[in-house]
Amino acid sequence: MRAITKKNLLILVTILLTFGIVQTLLTVGIINSFYEITIATICINIILAVSLNLVTGFTGQFSLGHAGFMSIGAYVCAIVNLQMNSTVGFLVGTFAGALVAALVGILVGIPTLRLRGDYLAIATLGMAEIIRVVFLNMEITNGAAGLNGIPRFTNWLWLFVFTAGTIILINNFIKSSHGRACISIREDEIAAESMGINTTKYKVMAFAIGAFFAGIAGALYSSYFFFVKPDLFGFLKSIDILVIVVLGGMGSLTGSVIAAVVLAVISTFLQSFTAVRMIVYAALLVLIMIFRPQGIMGTREITDLLKFIPRKKDDRIE
Amino acid sequence: MKKTLILLLVMIMVIGSFTACGGKKDAGNGGDAATEVKIGINYELTGAVATYGEASVDGILMAFDEINAAGGINGMKIVPVKVDNKSDAAEATALATRLMTQEGVVASLGPATSGNFMATIPVAMSSKVPVISASATADEGVTVDAKGNVNDYVFRLCFNDSFQGVTMANFAANNLSAKTAVIIQDNSSDYAKGLAKNFKETFTAAGGTIVAEEGYVAKDKDFNAILTSIKGKQFDVIFLPGYYQEAGLIIKQARDLGIAQPVLGADGFDSPVLLELAGAAALNDVYFSNHYSSLDQDPMVQDFIAAFKEKYGSDPNAFHALGYDLGKYIADAISRAGSTDPTAIKDALASTKDFAGVTGTFSMGQDHNPIKSIVVIGLENGVQTTSVKVDPK
């Protein structure tokens, strides 16, 4: 027990330090409002990548529909926020958006998660397209023009709370018996089933949790960028998220966090080079994939690398 | 499984990078405050609507070059700060923030499309730096917010969609003596829906009847089902709000089926691609509203066309013309403001009277929409042969 306490203490200190340092830099003005946008993008991408990693990396279910869940969160939060222009409204909208996304995740997951591999990818892709077309034709979402003038409540505090919260909750889920069941499905679905694991139940569970946090990310997005429209959540957005997960390592939360940061920094850095930016960005991805096909972190976590922290042998399933 | 996935992702990224067309090298930055004035250019240089962004920027830079060659604004050289928002709304917000808080621009031009332009409005309002678009035609949410208040720092240089819909309905009723019409609209585009709504209202108010309303979705290729169903009906004109990609195919397929009635559209038709898709033989009796016509014999327009051809080696389209006017308009406002204070520039922009541009002479209205004329262009064998100027009422 003592080892775990020490580890948790270290995590807590790291979390508070990260928050404190960035908060100080913001207050002093070293991080100006332009870099603040990069930070917002990073945090939103971390939430998206970590939640997709739970589905694709840990449970082994290849989903191409994450942007669909994100759009649900974004729209619900935007609609609630436009009615209730207050921090309470923002929080209500965020959780409402996340819950609706999770609900849709369950509804879609029950039939589609019986499919595997490529078939599941196509089914989730279709689902995201359906969500997008529904938003395109609904009156309350203002069709193709989208909703604009959404009040901004997302700030560094909320971004940090939700990002850290997502990582901690998903990490705890993975380490729980439910999480182990999910990992066993990834490793060998037939073996897991023969051991008495209800595979569909755990797949739907992982899918719903992934959708829930994608909804939160969407809500933060709409409240930060003032504006949502269906085009923003197309197929390519899902691919962007998947790129982060694959790049960071499927099955590594630390990897997703690192990849989200690295990609956002590269993208910001290349902003001034209009002509070459997409080529350089793509070339970097190709190079990383050639030299590290398992992703930056593989399936390891940062805690596996910090050898000085004593830990129990069965702390993780590799 | 994992290998195929990785290969797939890599291929998508590579293809993505090739289809996104490249922009040109950024102009210089930095410089002396007293002799230079920085103007932001936040446009779609890559991504889905890069053709609009590129054309607008070519026009703007041409205007800036002319002004700088003639000694600048009150002796100050214009320094454009050009950035690429990748046709992405979030990126447009980020870049607007960067231009206004980091680069210290006195005003920002663009983006070209309504959605991306709207994404920059909250930044402009909170940084108190004017943003102007030459081509954001959406009716709602641009210069006036949802509560009906004018967005102080937001301006546009083009008429809005409802004006185009109204103009084309009047054109159908008065110039073509049409009594009945069919509407075929792009259901995935707000632009097309807005146009269709206004056309319908004006056309029925003028005593006309809408016989049928059909819809399609952007990127559709085969329209024979829609066209066959309207072929059996009696009507005088087809109103086709949408963009050139689908409009070209619809016109071609309609003419192939023997539907010979006039086709009316809006500024979304303005692209050489329309001719490539439809073919010259099909483009007869096609009329669309536009910001300017190259047939306009006004010496200013003809001078612009000649100068543009000399600089870029091709004919300018409406986006080039709008970009050019935008560059001249902001320079005019800075010169009249007599200062580089964004608030003073905003006031000068708002009080513009009888500004003579290539796309028509206009005054800025109370709601920051210009009061300007519209041109209805007629095509015969794919060539622009007629142009009718309609003044605002």
Image: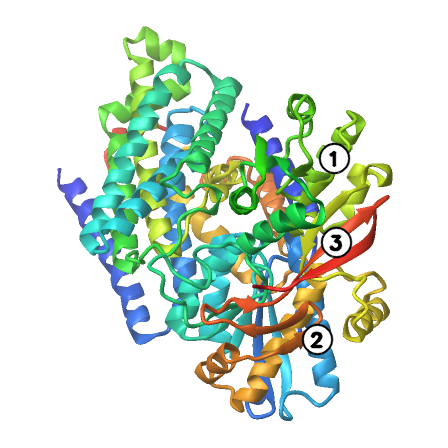
Percent coordinates x, y for residue B147 in the rendering:
33, 59
Q: What's the residue type where badge 1 is placed?
A: Gln
Q: Mark 1 points at which residue?
A: B261
Of residues A195 and B145, the one drawn nearer to the viewer in this rendering: B145
Q: Is disc 3 in contact with disc 2, using a CB cutoff of under 8 Å?
A: no
Q: What's the residue type where badge 2 is placed?
A: Ala
User: Quick one: label 3 or label 2, which is nearer the N terminus?
Assistant: 2
Q: Is disc 1 in contact with disc 2, using a CB cutoff of under 8 Å?
A: no
Q: Name the residue under label 3.
A: B377
Count of numbered marks? 3
**Which element type, helix, strand or loop, lies under badge 3?**
strand
Percent coordinates x, y for residue B227 in the rendering:
68, 26
**Which element type, helix, strand or loop, lies under badge 1?**
loop
Q: Kindly indicate the quadrant of the structure image that contains residue B374.
A: bottom right
Packing grade of label 1 (10 A; few <14, some 14-19, many >=20) is some
Rendered position, B182 above or below A183: below
Mark 3 and mark 2, same subunit?
yes
Q: Nearer the viewer, mark 1 or mark 2?
A: 1
Q: How far apart, in angstroms, are the residues tagged by discs 3 and 2?
A: 25 Å
Q: Nearer the viewer, mark 3 or mark 2?
A: 3
- For disc 1, the chain is B
Q: How far apart, in angstroms, are the residues tagged by discs 1 and 2?
A: 41 Å
Mark 1 and mark 2, same subunit?
yes
Packing grade of label 2 (10 A; few <14, some 14-19, many >=20) is many
Q: Mark 2 points at which residue?
A: B63
